Amino acid sequence: MSIDLAELRKLSVAERIQLAEDLWDSVALDAAQAPGLTEAQRLELRRRSLAVEAEPDAGIPWDEVRAELMAATPSR
């Protein structure tokens, strides 16, 4: 399968975010069939998926997390 990133970039930011969320949801739903995952990992994926569904705005945006990590990491 080949995905054309140039075509994906034509989507609005909101559309790309929704696409990423939909893709992740599809992975979580199929986690029971994913090779190499332990039962504990499958249960954790399901728990996290349900938590996001219950409170979709509870997370911290990646930009904020990244900025905090970069601020806490000493420069080399």
Image: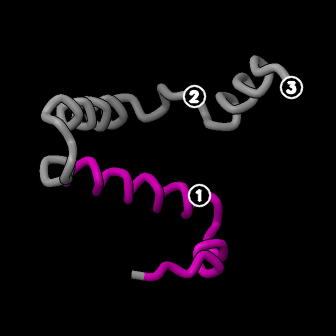
Magenta range is 2-30
Earlier in the chain: of badge 1 and badge 3, it is: 1
User: Comparing marks 1 and 2, which lies closer to the viewer?
Assistant: 2
Give how far across and how far down residue 27 sits, in percent: 29, 54
Task: State which tag comes first along the sequence, 3 or 2.
Answer: 2
Residue bearing the label numbered 3: 75
Disc 2 residue type? Answer: Ile
Q: Quadrant of the N terminus?
A: bottom left
| Residue named by callout 2 | 60
Quadrant position of the C terminus in the picture: top right
Counting every numbered tag in the picture gives: 3
Scheme by which the image is coloured: one colour
| 22 lies left or right of 67 | left
Q: Position of residue 4 (x, y in %)?
A: 56, 81
Q: Are marks 3 and 2 in contact (CB under 8 Å)?
A: no
Q: Position of residue 37 (x, y in %)?
A: 21, 42
How far apart are the alpha carbons under marks 3 and 2? 24 Å
Closer to the camera, 53 or 47? 47
Q: Which residue is mark 1?
A: 14
Numbered disc 2: secondary structure: loop
Point 69% across, 37% down: residue: 63
Which amino acid is tagged 3? Ser
Q: Is residue 39 above or below residue 34?
A: above
Q: Is residue 8 magenta?
A: yes
